[in-house]
Each structure stands twice: as C-alpha cells, then as structure tokens.
C-alpha cells in the first residue's frame, strides 16, 4: 500500500482524555491499534479474506512439486476407479433387545441436571440422543440461572468424551495407572485407614449437601480426618470479612437488578466472579432500554487496571494500579464517611471516586458496591460502604446466601507443615489440583510426597494425580448422581445421562465404601443414588412444606432439576471494625502486574477443554493460552503504539516475584498505563489438551496475611526476546473493517481499498443514554437514506414473495450482550463445528460460525467497548448466492440462506463476496470426515497436536447426529440452526397447529444468560423477535443496511449510561 | 319458530343416525377383529396367544348381563377394580397381562365381532386369503412410444427423399455442364465424411448418456435383497396376518427413523406363538435365544446374560427336539431329528453371534437395506404422520415380500419428483394456515392444490444440513 493513503488520525486532547477525530473515525469506533493507525496489516486483513501473515506456513510437509502433483493425480484417478468398482459396504441395523420405553430412536430426551465444578454452578437440561449426551441447555426453572448458561457449562459435555480420562482404578506410577480391581483398591486403602492415622481430604468448594453428608460419615468413622477446602481463585478474604462484619462466613446474594448505581472494585462479576450467570442475568435486566418506554438504566463503574469482561461492559472505568485497590476503596469510604485516613489513590482516580461517591449517596439503598479483593480489611470497608449506603438487606441480601465459595487457602499452610512433619498418613484429593494451581505447588509436591498413601478422585491424569499413588477416578458429572445447594434453599439435582463409559466410581461412593457406611447399599446397582435419595427423604424433605411425601418431593425435584425453598428474610447489621490502614498500600512501583481468571478456562480448571481453549478470550481475543496484556500508548499527537513499542505476538521475559516467565504480548486497550496483566490458567503441565499452551503464572503469586494476592509490584518486563510464530488472536480475522482507507474521497469507486473496508460503514451504532433522542433521529435519517439507496434497483422487490408462510429472523440486543461467549460454544456444540488448533487459528482457519466482534470507542487510553455477535445474516439479497458457480448456496422461501455442502466445490467466491465475513472454509480435513476406513487406524493412533480433533470414536460421540459433519474443501456457515427449525416445524405440523416462538429457538438464543438474542418468525406480528425489533424502534438497525443485501438480523444500538463529567 | 326448526333438525338427524346404524354382520366383525384384536388374540379362536382364545366367549359370559361383556371389552381394568366375578377370575388367570381399552367400540360393533368369533370357532377359518396387491405404486409406463417411432420413420423417409433430390439436382447440373452424372453406391454414401462424423457423434451421445446414467446409479442399490439373520417374512406378518406396519415400526410416526423393532416387540406375540406356521421352531427360537425366553417353561430367564453358551445350547436344543418329536408324534428322538436339531442350533449361533457381539445373547443384527447418503436427512414422521403417505409408496408392496428388498431407487430425482407431484394436506392442518396466499387462491378457485414443492419442498436445506 502506498504511504500517502495512511493518514494518521488526529488525536484530540479533551481536557483529560484523548479521543480520535479524523475522517475515517468520525463515528469514533475502532477495533485495534492497527485500525487506528491504518497500518498495512490491518488494511490487508480488511481488504482480503486472509492477511498474508502466517498464511503460507506449511512446515514443508504440504508442499507439492510437479512430480508430486502428477503422482497425486495418478493416484486420484486410480483411487476413483477402484472406489467406483467397489461394492457398497454392507451396513448393519441393530435394534434393542428390550427397547426402553422412554427412548424413541431419533428423538432427543432431555434430563434436568446441574453442571457443577467447585463453586461454579449452572442448572441445565442435558439433551441426549439414543442415550448419549450431546448438548447442554439452560434450565429456565432455576431462579439462579433462569435458563442462562455459560461457555464453561456449554462445554461440559465435551469433557465427558475426553480420550485422556482415567479409565479404571489403580496404582499410579510415572503418570500411568496400573489397573486394580475396585475391591482390591478398597482393601488396600481401608487397611491404611483402619490404623486411625491422620487423614486429610483436599478439595475445592463443595456445594453438594449430600456429598457433605458423605464426608461427615467418613469423618465420623475416621475422626482423625480433616477436610481442607480452597478455591482455585480465592475469595477467602470476602468470607472472612463477612464473618467479621455480619457473623457469617458466607457470600450474600448481590441483587444487581435492584441497583441503580453499581461500583465494582475489580470484581469481574459478569465473567468469572462467584456466580456470573446469575449476576449477568440480573445486571442485564437493568441495562435493557426501550425508547419511549423504558429509558432508565443502571450506571456501572468499574475500578480496575486490566480490562475485564465486566470492565468492558462498564459505563465508566476508573484506572488504577493493582496495588492502589485498597487506596481506591478507602477513598470511596472516606468520601462517604467523611474520614481522611489511609493510603491515597492517584489524583485522577481520587477525583473520579469523589464524583462516584456523590452519585452513590443519591442512590442510597439502590446501589451496590462489590470487590474481588483478597484483603480482609478492604472487604470489611466494602461492607461498611454498603452499610453506609443502606444497601444491606436490599441489594446485599443475606437471606439467601451463596455457598459457591467456601475455600480458605490459609488452611493449606498448616497442611503443608503437617505433611512435612510426616504427620499425615492418608491424603485424598477430590477435584482440586493443588500440585499445579497453588502458588507454592513445588513445595506442596515435596510435602505431599511424604504422605504414605495419596489418593486422587480426579478424572484425568493431572499434575496432582500424577504424584498420588492411587487413582480412584470419579465419574464424569454427566455419569453421576448428586445434588447442589449453590445458594441457601436453592436445591438442585444432578442425574446421570449415560452409563459410566469407563470403570470409574463416584467419589462419594468411594468415601462411603471406605467408611464402611451402613447407609450405602452395596448390593444396589447404583448405591450412591439410593444414598442420595434417602438423604433427600430424611433431611432435605423436612426443610420444605410443598410436598407431603418424600417420594413426591424427590420425583418432582428430579423432574424439574431444581427445588426452591422460599427464603426467609435475614436482616443483618454491620458489626465489623473498619481499619483504613489495614488495606494494601500503593507500591509506587513504575510497573505492576495483575493476574486474572478468564471467562473460558478459569484459573486452569477448564484448560483441557478444546472448545473453551478455542473460544477467543472476549477482551483480548486470543485463543489457546494466556498472553501478557500491555497498555496502548499515545504520544498525544499522531502516534498510537503498544507499550515499549511491542507488537502483538512478540515475546518478552517477565521477571515477577523472582519468577522468570516468557510471555507473548498482546496490546490491549483499557489496560492502565504502567501496568500489565496476564491470565491464570496457562501452561498446564499434564492431563489434556491444555498442556504447553501459555505460561504457568501461579508460582509468581504472592501472599499477604496468608491470602493469595493476584497482583505484584515487583515486576520487570524485558524488551522483545522473540516472536511466537503461532500467535493466534482472532481480532483481525474475518474483519469487516469500519472505515475507508481512502482519505479525501468517500466515493467508493475511487477508494483504493474497497473490499471489506468501505467508506463509513454502519456496523456499530452507539450513544450515551442522555443522547438517546439524538441517536434515534440520526438513525432515522440513516434508515431513510439506506432505504432510498436500496430502492434504486432495476430488479423487482422480493419482499412480497417472503410474505407467504414463514420468514426467519433474529434480533440481537447489543445493550444486553456482555460478550461472555456462551452462544459461541453453544453453536460449536450444536453444529459440530470442528476444533482446529492454535496453529490453524493463527492461519485464520478458525471455523466458528458465530464470532463475537469487539469494537472500541471513546478515550483511547480508557475506551468503551461494544460486543457484537456476528453470524450469517441470511440476506434476502445475498451476495454470496449470486456468485456460486454450482448453486451450492441458495435462498429458501423461509428466508434462509442455505448451504448444501455436498454441492460445494470450494471456489470460496461466496466467502469472498460476503460483506459480513461469516463464511468458513474447511481448509483441512478437521473432522476426519474424509478418512477412508483403511486409514482410520493410522490417524487415530496419532498423538497430541498431530491428531485431528474428532479422530477418535469417543470424541465423535459428542456429534449432533442431525447435522452433517463437513469434509474438506467445502464452505460452511451459520444455518440459523436449520435442524431446530425443521424439528420445530414438524412438531407443530404433527400437532396440527400454528408454529410458536418456543418451537424453534436457536442454540445461541437458548445459551444466552442475558436474553440478548431472540430468534423467530418475522411474518408473525406477535412473535417475540418482531415485538422486540419493533420496540427498539429507530435504534434497531441492520448491519450494512445501506448496501441492499437485506439481512434478516436486526441489531439494536449500544447505549451506555456513561458519566461524561467523571474526568472533567 | 326457531325452536321448532331446531326440533325438526334434531328429529331428522336422529332418524338418520338410527338408519345409519347397521345391523351387526360377521363381515364387519372380521374387519374389526383384525383391526383391534388380532395382535393379541389368536385368529383361529381356539388357541391362546398374548390373550385368551376368544372362541366360546359368549357361553362363558352367558351367566352375566350382555352389557357386562361390553364393558369388559371397553375397559377391563375398571371391571377388575369393581370386582366383577368373571373379571376377577380372568385377571387371576392372565395377570399381569392387561387387555387394551377400546372405549370407542359400539354395542353393534362388539356384536359384529362376536358373530365373527362364533363363525370362525364353529365353522373354522377359511385359510388366509392371498394378500391383496391393490397398493398404488409408481408404474413405469411400459407402452411402446409409437408416436416417436412414427416421427422417426417420417423423418428418415424425408431425409432419404431429400438426399435423392439433392443428388438428382447435382447430377442435372453436371449433365448440363457436360459432365457425367455420379451415382454413388450405398457403401460410398456410408463412408462419406458426413456420415462417419454423424456416427461418431451419435456414439458419443449414446455412451455419454449411458455413462452419466450409470454414474448416478453409483452408490444406489435398488433391488438390494440381502439375506437376513432371521428369515422374517413380511408376506406372512403384514400380508396374511395383516399386522399394521406401525405396530412393529412404531417410531415411524414419531421419529426420523422407522426403526427395526426390538426383540421385546416380537415377544408380544411370540411368547404365545412359539412355532411358526412355515418354519416351525427354526426361526422363532432365534428370538428366544436373543432375549432369553424359555419356551418350555413359558417364561423369561432372569439371569440370562450370565448364561454360558452351553446352557443356552442345552435349553434350545431340548425345545427344538421336543417340538420335533411332538410334530412327528415320536416318543424317542430319531436320527433325522438329531440332525435337524443340530442344524437349527447352528442357524441360531450363526444368526446371533458375530464380530460385534460374541455372545448368543443380545440383539439380532439385521442387514440394513435402505441406506440413505449421510448428507441427506429424511424424516419418517414427516411423511407418515404429517403427509400420511402409505409406507408402500416408497417401500413397495412389502406385504407380498418374503424377503424384503429395496423397492425404490432412493435417488434424489426420485424424491424430487414426488415432492413436485404430491399434494399437501393443506386444509386439515392448522399449521398451514400461515400460507394465506395459497388459501386465498384455493378459495377463489385460482388454484386446485398446493404441492410440496410450493411450500419449499425442493429447497436444498429441507434435506441437506
């Protein structure tokens, strides 16, 4: 590209913040630094389907010379001839011997259950086909999740079919399990336990009442037992502060829906903090607006250094350094209480907090202040702030406390000492992975080795199981019985949806077996089921009054999956002692680092799930591994660059708390100046596909007062030391491009780059709440202009044609979308979208049908964010359809843009012509669908990266049998879940009635925790999708409305409720 | 005035209803029996099946009012619960097998059935009638295309005549210019460039057509008629016994699959019918061996999955031998009996043991006949329950097939043709109300019918996704 085209933007200083003002960016929206600087790489990626970086990486093994070409040609012809003369293989049809009543082959069954991992909880329905779970749906009966799910819950079904699961019990040596029969294992362990020696059970939070009963039974039998509970990301200070302030070490129910002003000190409550599905659902209620009807929305301030998912949704962010968190909390406290003690936060933040305090005071009783700090004094002050604001018992409710965090890592110090002293004889690890996730994992391992009997219930050969001497693998959650009480009175059941795939056993069963429990009926086929049922009958039944018999109580709870005992109001009063000097002190260091949990892989617990690894981090949009986020700087005139001039994908040495880490850098807007951040959960060492992606930062964590601190001030970052050649960030993949590269002209014909980067494009509309009317008017004008443009056509309109029968469409409320990615994983799960791996993603080959685009606007150093789920828009005037030479993509009379894979010959003209860049090409045989049976053995035995996803019959069990598995060389894209449409239509037809909204719900719609996506029949004036788009009035728009492709997806403009005076 | 009219209407309706109620006939009874009773009660009325033999029912219920018999047939469990003496007696003998309820049967219909039962019981069954073949099938037009042959002949004549004229005119010009006329022989004519080119062109066309035709046949298996592990006869079950297709293939109306029935479905009848009318013990014993039914004791074996092959062999050989001796009225086993037992046992092992299941116990592995390509989605329920298409439309006259074969090509063109021609049951189903334009056109006579094509039945993504 020529230099004169790259016109730098004008950066304007607006008293205290910097905004972009130039003709490309006159809508003030950008996607990245490259976009802002109009860098060649960006223009290329906006111009072309694929940018050139990484694209020609071949490893040499795929290179084809002339001779190879001839050989292949010859072989191809020969193979085709042989194949043509082969007989059609004989297929078998194997019926049941005794067909279960509930199963009709070909019809899905749904079972209510719960997805629980430590404190993470989601009430779900598990979809099974012919007895195998294939999809997770939300359970709308639950008051906690209300039918919403998270990416983690959606992906749980894949871990059931993990090829690396431990398949039987046995002795562990060198990371391998030597098989033992369960009775033999029981005998050996019981012999050890019988000595009465001290036993320690190490677990993450357990929210199951019956599992706790089983633990109690075990402790009763072996009184020398202690249960040590910690959480991968600690909330111990919050629990301790609540104990000090209110007398109960529990987490209250935070009512985000009742709060008009929300202030979060670092708590990522929409993404990862405690109960994100519940919070996101409540939060979104107060963020939805309907012009003319409901124009009130909450205001959300986020005080943080690294841009979290929650921060990216906030109206205003107050940037601080991680060590200033205590000072920031004290600043707010002082403003509200009139005090003046304690450490001081930076001036800019102090001024902002002053204004926030005033606003909070006005919303007394209807505000909410939360913090994820792991410092007791800070949490006590936050409690006091809520007390001062009158939020106790309104937005902070102790009537239904949450039990989702119970861990306290301080107990581990004692455990380590005991183990080192050789006092612990038996250690049982239940779900936790201390040998990796602890900051002092090495010390733990050394001490752990001194325990003679070490047993692990974990399902895969993770770092801890590898250093145990017995593996007693538990069932996967979807094979287990169980229950959960995530919040007081909210009971939830877990039921098996498949027979155990391997010779595993429930952890609770093992404990009861070893405790010789009289309540465990070993003769029964499912002993723990009986135990669970009788516990519900004897204890939980007594807590409710709705049902008269335990049987009815059990049956209905099992059917619904949940049972809710009405809460009793439990008013609390603040009784703690505020110590403004007990908070963490600002370090004054020039550079600080913070560590955070990610939405997809948590603190590493979910690292072995390929669906989650390949889901881009919502904020920095990288996949497979953790990356060092560095701030973006501007010289205030014409230059925007990464800190230290570092570029994405470059590697640096990070020296933190004495640990040397080699990290890959990603520039991230919104990262506070003078800080960097990196996610936990990278660099797993054993147990699955997450191994070797990213770096393990746990050893760099430090403690204060026994509590883990997720930041460090003692940090140095080197200059570039290398480049990660497989750096995979999807930000510029399939980018639509917001602006023209041509400067002087807005004339499309004269623009140098027109494909994918047209002039001023209508992709995102955003405004501040107070300017709502203005935006409405502007958009009205825009709609008119677009309509005028679109009517200038020679072709007759097709609108009339679509009025007969059904017309499918979607409405996406950008104001409700928080970018959590649940829809993306749901789509992958529903539609058999393959996992391609990091190297392929780096080559722009990711296959996801639905991506969540992230756009910035506002202040360069502290911008606002808009998330936009982008999938096939099913244009009625689709550009892709016209260019297909073989009519593989055509339009249906129901408005669907259809894709016939077997017709596709892979010209990719359609992908090239798609203005939304939503078509994906199968560059390689990702699913091994093309494999000849004779080659399967060879491929199936490959290991690690070499092995394609789905190249295993176990993993293939997760496939949705109603959706074709695509082979190499064809295009695929969002089908509006056509299999669900067909199923819904059939149900209505069979019942002889009109089709209803509930008959057809797309996978992304059902997964969404905030109800941002609505799907339905546009021809029905009463359908939800029509009502919603109508209610949004002028704020509803179609992306690229002006180019007359007539998409079927309506978006609504993003409206923020920012306080524009915060920094003035 | 109004009231009077209404009274009149009612009187007329009542009178019509009375006259419409037909007198009970044994013909009507036979139909009703086949439709409602035959799957559980033996059609010879003399032997027990899943339910008791019905011959002599009238006498056995003679001690009670006739309406008791009616209520028994309509809802037997209610009578058992009420403690009717005959009902409790029957229940004691037959429980836990409960009889289905038939609340819809009228008194007359029941009387018709009793007439039929008595008729068969006293006069004997007339033997199964040959199965009817009145099924509508797509008959290929076998007429010779005389019209085309005629056209071809005329064209050939024309060509010949023209050739002659051209030749003559050519010769005339030659003669006029003083040259000798040329008269070509047939061989000369046929070896001209034009003729050879035409021949080559025609051959290319013919072979090309043939090649494309054969290529589209690849992967299709019309007429495929593999051997099955059990010689199950649809001719007997669906044809002679007139068992409804969906009695066994019950998921066809609910699911995309029509499903091969589980062994337990076979056992609904075959726990009573232990020997076949054609094959004796040879085939039915395979079902017993699959599910673990002891035909001698007449009950299921509790821990069948733990049985050794030896135990299984012993049991079923005993059964086959016993039946052989009964049939031949022997008191001791003879040599041919022994070899018969051995042969049948080998048949059982061959049918049930295979690569994927090394045991006798377990499912019967049938050879799948109808294989659709993986990328084509087909839903039985859509066609059976919504479209109300007869199974035979695609599967052919299965009720005449001793061994089932693939009747249709299952090619895409075949599907498409049917979708073009088939009329949608548009008026009876509220689902189709949304197609307002079509309804208007139907109402004002602009259109006669709505075909599957017109509601999108030819669109790619109706079958490919």
Image (cartoon, coloured by chain):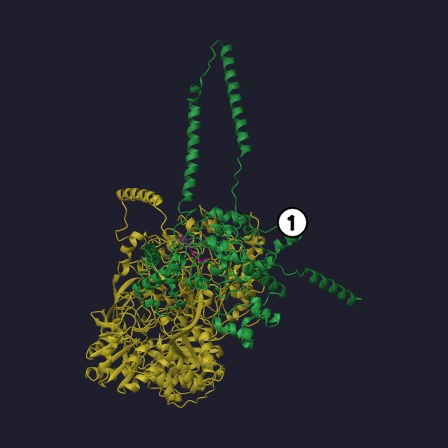
Chain colours: A yellow, B green
Which quarter of the figure has residue A940? bottom left
In magenta stretch: residue A972: yes
* Residue B205: image location, x then y, percent: 44, 34
The chain containing the residue under callout 1 comes to: B
* Residue A920: image location, x then y, percent: 40, 55
In magenta stretch: residue B20: no
The answer to whether residue B255 is visible is no
Which quarter of the figure has residue B185? top left
Point 41% across, 41% down: residue:
B214
Q: Mark 1 points at which residue?
A: B446
* Residue projecting furthest to the right: B1
Element at label 1: loop
Which quarter of the figure has residue A596? bottom left
| Magenta span | A971-977
Quarter of the N terminus of chain B within the rendering: bottom right
* Residue A176: image location, x then y, percent: 22, 68
Residue B185 to residue A1016: above or below = above
Quarter of the C terminus of chain B within the rendering: bottom left
């Amino acid at each position: 590209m020529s230099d004169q085209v790259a016109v730098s933007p004008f950066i304007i200083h607006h008293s205290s913040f910097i905004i972009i003002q130039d003709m490309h960016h006159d809508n003030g929206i950008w996607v990245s630094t490259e976009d802002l600087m109009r860098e060649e790489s960006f223009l290329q990626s906006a111009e072309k389907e694929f940018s050139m970086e990484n694209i020609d990486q071949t490893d040499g093994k795929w290179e084809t010379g002339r001779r190879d070409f001839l050989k292949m040609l010859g072989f191809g012809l020969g193979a085709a001839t042989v194949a043509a003369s082969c007989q059609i293989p004989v297929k078998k049809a194997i019926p049941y011997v005794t067909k279960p009543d509930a199963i009709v082959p070909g019809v899905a069954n749904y079972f209510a259950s719960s997805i629980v991992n430590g404190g993470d909880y989601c009430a779900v329905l598990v979809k099974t086909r012919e007895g195998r779970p294939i999809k997770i749906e939300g359970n709308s009966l639950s008051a906690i999740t209300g039918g919403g799910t998270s990416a983690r819950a959606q992906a749980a079904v894949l871990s059931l079919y993990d090829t690396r699961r431990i398949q039987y019990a046995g002795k562990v040596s060198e990371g391998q399990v030597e098989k033992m029969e369960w009775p033999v294992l029981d005998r050996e362990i019981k012999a050890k336990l019988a000595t009465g020696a001290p036993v320690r059970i190490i677990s993450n939070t357990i929210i199951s009442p019956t599992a706790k009963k089983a633990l109690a039974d075990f402790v009763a039998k072996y009184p020398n037992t202690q249960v040590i509970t910690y959480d991968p990301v600690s909330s111990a200070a919050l629990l301790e502060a609540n104990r000090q302030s209110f007398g109960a070490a529990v987490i209250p129910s935070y009512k985000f829906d009742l709060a008009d002003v929300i202030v979060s000190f670092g708590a990522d409550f929409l993404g990862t903090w405690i109960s994100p599905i519940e919070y996101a659902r409540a939060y979104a209620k107060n963020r939805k607006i309907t012009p003319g009807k409901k124009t009130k929305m909450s205001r959300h301030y986020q005080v943080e250094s690294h841009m979290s998912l929650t921060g990216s949704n906030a109206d205003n962010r107050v940037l601080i350094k991680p060590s200033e968190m205590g000072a920031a909390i004290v600043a707010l406290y002082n403003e509200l209480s009139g005090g003046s003690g304690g450490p001081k936060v930076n001036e800019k933040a102090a001024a902002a907090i002053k204004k926030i305090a005033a606003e909070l005071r006005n919303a007394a009783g209807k505000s909410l202040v939360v913090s994820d700090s792991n410092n007791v004094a800070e949490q006590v002050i936050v409690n006091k702030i809520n007390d001062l604001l009158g939020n106790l018992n309104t937005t902070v409710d102790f009537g239904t406390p949450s039990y989702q965090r119970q861990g306290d890592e301080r107990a581990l110090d004692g455990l380590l000492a005991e183990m080192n002293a050789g006092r612990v004889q038996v250690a049982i690890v239940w779900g936790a992975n201390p040998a990796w996730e602890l900051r002092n994992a090495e010390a733990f391992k050394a001490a752990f080795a001194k325990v003679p009997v070490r047993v692990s219930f974990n399902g895969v050969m993770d770092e801890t199981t590898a250093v145990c001497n017995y593996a007693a693998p538990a069932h996967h959650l979807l094979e287990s019985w169980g229950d959960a009480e995530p919040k007081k009175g909210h009971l939830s059941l877990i039921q098996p949806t498949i027979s155990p795939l391997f010779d595993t056993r429930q952890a609770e069963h093992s404990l009861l077996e070893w405790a010789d429990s009289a309540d465990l009926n070993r003769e029964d086929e499912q002993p723990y089921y009986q135990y669970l049922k009788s516990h519900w009958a004897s204890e939980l039944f007594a807590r409710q009054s709705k049902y008269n018999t335990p049987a009815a109580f059990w049956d209905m709870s099992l059917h619904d999956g949940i049972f809710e005992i009405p809460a009793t109001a439990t008013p609390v009063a603040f009784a703690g002692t505020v110590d403004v000097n007990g908070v963490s002190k600002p370090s004054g260091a020039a550079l600080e680092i913070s560590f955070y949990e990610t939405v997809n892989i948590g603190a590493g617990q979910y690292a072995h799930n390929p669906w989650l690894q390949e889901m881009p981090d919502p904020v920095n949009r990288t996949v497979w591994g953790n990356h060092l986020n560095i701030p973006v700087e501007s010289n205030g005139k014409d230059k925007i660059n990464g800190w230290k001039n570092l570029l994405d994908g470059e590697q640096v040495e990070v020296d933190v708390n004495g640990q040397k880490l080699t990290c890959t850098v990603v520039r991230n807007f919104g990262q506070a100046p003078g800080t960097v951040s990196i996610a936990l959960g990278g660099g797993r060492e054993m147990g699955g596909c997450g191994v070797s992606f990213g770096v393990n930062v746990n050893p760099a964590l430090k403690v204060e007062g026994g509590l883990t601190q997720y930041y460090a001030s003692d940090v140095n970052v080197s200059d570039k030391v290398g480049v990660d050649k497989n750096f995979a960030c999807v930000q510029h993949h399939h980018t639509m491009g917001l602006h023209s590269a041509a400067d002087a002209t807005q004339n499309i014909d004269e623009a140098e780059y027109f494909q994918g980067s047209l002039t001023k494009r209508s992709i995102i509309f955003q405004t501040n709440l107070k300017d709502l009317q203005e935006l409405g008017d502007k958009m009205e004008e825009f709609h008119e202009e677009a309509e005028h443009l679109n009517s200038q056509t020679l072709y007759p309109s097709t609108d009339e044609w679509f009025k007969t029968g059904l017309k499918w469409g979607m409405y996406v409320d950008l104001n409700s979308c928080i970018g959590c990615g649940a829809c993306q994983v749901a789509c992958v799960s529903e539609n058999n979208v393959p996992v391609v791996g990091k190297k392929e993603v780096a080559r722009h080959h990711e296959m996801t049908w639905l991506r969540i685009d992230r756009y910035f606007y506002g202040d360069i150093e502290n911008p606002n964010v808009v998330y936009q789920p982008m999938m096939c828009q099913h244009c009625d005037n689709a550009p892709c359809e016209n260019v297909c030479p073989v009519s593989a993509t055509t339009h249906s009379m129901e408005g669907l843009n259809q894709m016939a894979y077997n017709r596709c010959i892979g010209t990719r003209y359609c992908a090239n012509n798609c203005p939304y860049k939503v078509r994906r090409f199968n560059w390689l045989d990702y699913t091994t669908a093309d494999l000849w049976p004779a080659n399967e053995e060879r491929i199936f035995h490959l290991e690690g990266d070499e092995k394609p996803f789905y190249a295993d019959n176990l993993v293939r069990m997760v496939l949705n049998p109603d959706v074709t598995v695509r082979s190499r060389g064809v295009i695929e894209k969002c089908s509006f879940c056509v299999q669900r449409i067909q199923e819904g239509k059939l149900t209505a037809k069979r019942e002889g009635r009109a089709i209803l909204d509930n008959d057809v719900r797309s996978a992304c719609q059902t997964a969404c925790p905030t109800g941002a996506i609505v799907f339905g029949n546009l021809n029905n004036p009463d359908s939800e999708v029509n009502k919603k788009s109508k209610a949004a009035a002028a704020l509803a728009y179609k992306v690229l409305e002006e180019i007359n492709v007539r998409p079927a997806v309506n978006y609504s403009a993003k409206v923020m409720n920012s306080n524009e005076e915060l920094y003035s | 005035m109004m009231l009077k009219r209404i009274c009149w209407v009612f009187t007329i309706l009542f009178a019509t209803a009375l006259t419409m109620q037909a007198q009970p006939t044994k013909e009507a009874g036979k139909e009703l029996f086949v439709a409602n009773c035959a799957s559980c009660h033996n059609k010879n009325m003399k032997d027990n099946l899943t339910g008791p033999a019905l011959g002599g029912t009238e006498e056995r219920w003679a001690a009670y009012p006739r309406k008791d018999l009616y209520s028994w047939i309509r809802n037997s469990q209610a009578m058992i619960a009420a403690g009717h003496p005959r009902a409790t007696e029957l229940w004691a003998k037959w429980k836990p097998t409960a009889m289905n309820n038939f609340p819809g049967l009228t008194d007359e219909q029941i009387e018709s059935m009793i007439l039929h039962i008595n008729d068969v019981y006293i006069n004997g069954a007339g033997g199964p009638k040959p199965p009817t073949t009145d099924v509508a099938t797509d008959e290929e037009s076998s007429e010779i295309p005389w019209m085309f042959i005629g056209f071809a002949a005329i064209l050939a004549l024309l060509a010949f005549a023209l050739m002659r004229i051209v030749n003559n005119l050519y010769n005339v010009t030659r003669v006029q210019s003083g040259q000798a006329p040329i008269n070509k022989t047939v061989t000369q004519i046929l070896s001209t460039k034009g003729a050879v080119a035409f021949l080559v062109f025609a051959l290319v066309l013919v072979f090309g057509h043939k090649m494309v035709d054969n290529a589209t046949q690849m992967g299709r298996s019309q007429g495929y008629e593999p051997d099955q592990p059990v010689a199950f006869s649809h001719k007997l079950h669906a044809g002679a016994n007139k068992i409804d297709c969906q009695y066994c293939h019950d998921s066809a109306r609910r699911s995309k699959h029509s499903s091969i029935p589980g062994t337990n479905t076979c056992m609904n009848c075959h726990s009573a019918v232990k020997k076949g009318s054609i094959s004796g013990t040879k085939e039915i014993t395979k079902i017993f061996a699959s599910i673990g039914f002891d035909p001698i004791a007449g009950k299921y074996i509790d821990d069948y999955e733990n049985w050794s092959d030896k135990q299984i062999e012993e049991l079923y050989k005993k059964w086959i031998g016993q039946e052989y001796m009964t049939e031949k009225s022997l008191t001791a086993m003879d040599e041919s009996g022994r070899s018969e037992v051995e042969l049948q046992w080998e048949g059982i092992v061959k049918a049930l043991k295979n690569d994927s299941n090394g045991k006798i116990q377990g499912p019967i592995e049938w050879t799948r006949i109808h294989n659709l390509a993986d990328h084509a989605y087909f839903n039985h329920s859509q066609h059976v329950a919504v479209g109300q298409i007869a199974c035979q439309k695609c599967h052919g006259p299965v009720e005449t097939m001793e061994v089932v074969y693939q009747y249709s090509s299952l090619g895409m063109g075949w599907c498409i043709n049917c979708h073009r021609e088939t009329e949608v049951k548009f008026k009876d189903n509220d689902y189709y109300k949304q197609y307002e334009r079509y309804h208007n056109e139907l109402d004002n006579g602009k259109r006669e019918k709505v075909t599957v094509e017109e509601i999108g039945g030819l669109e790619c993504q109706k079958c490919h996704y």
